[in-house]
Image (cartoon, rainbow, N blue to C red):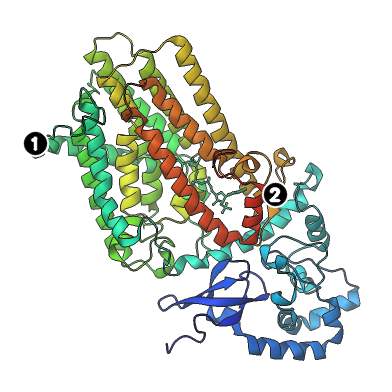
Amino acid sequence: MPNRKFADGEVVMGRWPGSVLYYEVQVTHYDDVSHLYTVKYKDGTELALKESDIRSQSSFKHRKSQSSSSSPSRKSRSRSRSPGRPAKGRRRSSSQSREHKDDKKKTVQETNLALPKPSENNTRRYNGEPDSTEKNDTSCIISEQKLKPDLETERVLEQYSLRPRKEEKKKEEIYSEKKVFETKPLEKASSKTKDLEFGGRIGTFVLIFFLPATVFYLLLKCKQDDPSLLNFHPPLPALESLWEARVFGIFLLWFFLQALFYLLPIGKVVEGLPLSNGRKLQYRINGFYAFILTAAAIGILLYFQFELHYLYDHFMQFAVSAAAFSMILSIYLYIRSLKAPEEELAPGGNSGYFIYDFFTGHELNPRIGSFDLKYFCELRPGLIGWVVINLAMLLAEMKIHNQSMPSLSMILVNSFQLLYVVDALWNEATVLTTMDITHDGFGFMLAFGDLVWVPFVYSLQAYYLVGHPNAISWPVAAAITVLNCIGYYIFRSANSQKNNFRRNPSDPKLAHLKFIPTATGKGLLVTGWWGFVRHPNYLGDIIMALAWSLPCGFNNILPYFYVIYFICLLVHREARDEHHCKQKYGLAWERYCQRVPYRIFPYVY
Ligand code: NDP
């Protein structure tokens, strides 16, 4: 190991990103390519640090004694504080200030080193939760750079409640300071992925075949007169019947039409979360406009008697076209990712194993110019495609069964899912903070998920109803609608509560909520929806998924595939998120889990 200074397992002093403070950490890994050390803090937080941010314990101790002697009073003034939080300033007289200013550079250095080691203090300092009994004036150095002393003091005292309106401005200052801290821990993004998910290399290899096979199996089952599980083996179509160049052409037309809508200079441009290098990408928010334009285009097609149920008649061929396209796209994405700089690779898809990285996505934000491929695919061709497919199923039902009106079941399924898609597009900017955008690369998983799984599996209920009509009464329809509204209400208010809190923690509308501060500067809500369960938005989503299946009746389990799969997906996603949050927030996260013990279902899970 000629290039590295510190060995795995070595206990050293690591600088907390964004601050001038050093803490005892253990080296767990070194990345030869990025030259970053992965280090573990005492609260379990793992970060990637540059060698220049790490010092040996011996040099630390040595300088500490020097600093103590050069400034005997310093030790008695010293006050421990949580690592990721901006430090409190201390009021000084002007002469003290001048003296301090003169000596500023030196003092910063010395004060860092004069900090007592975390082990010598209460380990609570690592969890980012302020302790009003803490004593240490090292903060005065940092405070002169950024924060006003009173604000920090008040924040410590008011650690669990949001501020009243009049203090909004002050609080904003604090949170703007926090942004500095939020950017730094993301340095980890450029290190190698060590914890392989989805069953590692074997798991992802299997999934590349299993996911398309599942889609085709479900679609074939839906076509069966008796799609029960006992009637396991659906008749297989002739291979040549699965492919039609015209269908592929229509798919390409659809994809590029959506790309054109995406490129239109309408809608505002917003910034995403900071990347590992601190840079923020810009995204145009015009998904809802794209939806309106698509609706207008479909309206024109229908006006000119275009038979939209063509989609139903060639459904399997469309699915094959979309799958082929997603595979080609994934291969392109992987090839181009090989040339991407290390810092632009996905934290979750940089294992060095071809299959794993191909599946999870090697590059985090592949772009052609300003065209963001992942962001575009997340909400446009697949999601809007889903409601167009639903509409095609509705028209196919009317045509096949000679109905002048669609069935009540079909209307419910169409309306519920339309609401879900419109909601996603209306709140498009919120996708920028999801795991898909911030953590997962763009590879087969998302390409296939966005372009095939979402439009062709999520529309299963509507597809099922065409071949298996289910009459429901108005009271049953009303009960299902109420259930969907409850799910939607939980889903939307939970997501909005968190998004608003992340965007502006001092929002007066959130003043009644309490939160636990964390070392990164972000808070964890412990009242409101996020104090009810740890993923209230998943709960609402699952309730809605059930409401989408119920109109299909109870004759068959097939239309319930979505809700079953969705519970599995969100339980797995919750576990992934939990793992990331544990790494990000350490003990603060554990404390949150103690306060809010249930993950998704209250008193159950
Ligand atoms: P979430 O919106 O649930 O976000 C999780 C993040 O929220 C955490 O990583 C953390 O990030 C933050 N957080 C966690 N706890 C708290 C708290 N107590 N207070 C404040 N912030 C907290 O993530 P998803 O991307 O998984 O889900 C977004 C939505 O998309 C959900 O409604 C979900 O149901 C839906 N979804 C739908 C799918 C579908 O196929 N239909 C698939 C997947 C998701 P940080 O602290 O960094 O901000």
Q: Is residue 297 shown to the viewer in this render?
A: no
* Camera-side residue of 414 and 581: 581
First in sequence: mark 1 or mark 2?
A: 1
Q: Quadrant of residue 346?
A: bottom left
Q: Quadrant of residue 603?
A: top right
Query: In the image, is 578 to the left or to the right of 455?
Result: right
Q: Residues within 10 Å of mark 2 (few under 14, many from 20)?
A: many
- The kind of residue on which mark 2 rests is Phe
Foreground of the two, 368 or 564? 564
Query: In the rendered structure, which amino acid carries the disc numbered 1?
Result: Ala
Q: Residue at x 56, y 65 (%)?
A: 185
Instruction: Report x, y in % for residue 134.
Output: 80, 67
Task: Kindly identify which numbered label has been placed on residue 238.
Answer: 1
Q: Position of residue 256 (x, y in %)?
A: 28, 41
Residue displayed at 35% across by 34% down: 561
Q: Does 410 sit above or below residue 343?
A: above
Q: Is residue 331 visible in this depiction of the protein? A: yes
Q: Residue at x 81, y 76 (%)?
A: 78
Residue at mark 1 to residue at mark 2: CA–CA distance? 59 Å
Q: Position of residue 140 (x, y in %)?
A: 79, 72
Crowdedness near tag 1: few (<14), some (14–19) or many (≥20) residues, C-alpha within 10 Å: few
Could you say which is closer to the camera, residue 15 or residue 600?
600
- Which residue is painted at 28% across and 46% down in the image? 211
Instruction: Report how many numbered discs are placed on residues in the image.
Output: 2
Ligand 1 closer than 8 Å to label 2 CB: yes
Residue that label 2 marks:
515
